[in-house]
């Protein structure tokens, strides 16, 4: 799939989930970065860090 104006939309994400090879193009570099992050698989090595951030946030709110 080719998305010539990928933007931060979900077309690339939907393609990744479906296992469809996809290429997205955009002139806005921030949008390109957001699309890459959105379509990337989650990093399992960051799960403990995310849990700690959640605990710290909960403790600050309480």
Image (tube, grey):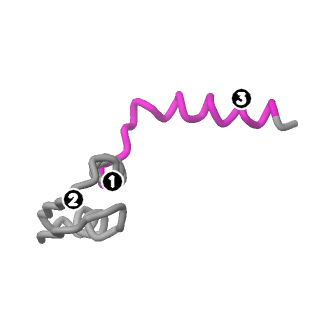
Q: Which residue is mark 1?
A: 31
Indicate which disc, 2 or 1, sits on the residue closer to the N terminus: 2
Task: Give the spatial CA distance, label 3 vs label 1.
Answer: 30 Å
Where 9 sits versus 31, above or below? below
Q: Is 56 situated left or right of 38 in this image? A: right
Which residues lie in the magenta part?
39-60
Image-quadrant location for residue 21:
bottom left
Query: 10 Å neighbourhood of mark 1: few (<14), some, or many (≥20)?
Result: some
Q: Quadrant of the C terminus?
A: top right
In-front residue for pair 11/16:
11
x then y, percent, for residue 20: 15, 68
Q: Which residue is mark 2?
A: 26
Indicate which disc, 2 or 3, sits on the residue closer to the N terminus: 2
x then y, percent, for residue 36: 28, 49
x then y, percent, for residue 41: 31, 48
**Dominant secondary structure (helix, strand or loop) of the stretch shown in magenta:** helix
Query: 10 Å neighbourhood of mark 3: few (<14), some, or many (≥20)?
Result: few
Image-quadrant location for residue 18:
bottom left
Where 32 sits versus 61, above or below? below
C-beta proximity under 8 Å, tags 3 and 1: no
Element at badge 2? Answer: loop
Q: Which residue is mark 3?
A: 56
């Amino acid at each position: 799939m080719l998305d010539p104006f990928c933007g931060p939309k979900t077309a690339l994400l939907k393609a990744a989930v479906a296992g469809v090879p996809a290429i997205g193009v955009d002139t806005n570099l921030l949008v390109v970065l957001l699309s890459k992050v959105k379509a990337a698989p989650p990093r399992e090595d960051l799960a403990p860090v995310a849990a700690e951030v959640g605990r710290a946030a909960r403790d600050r709110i309480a």
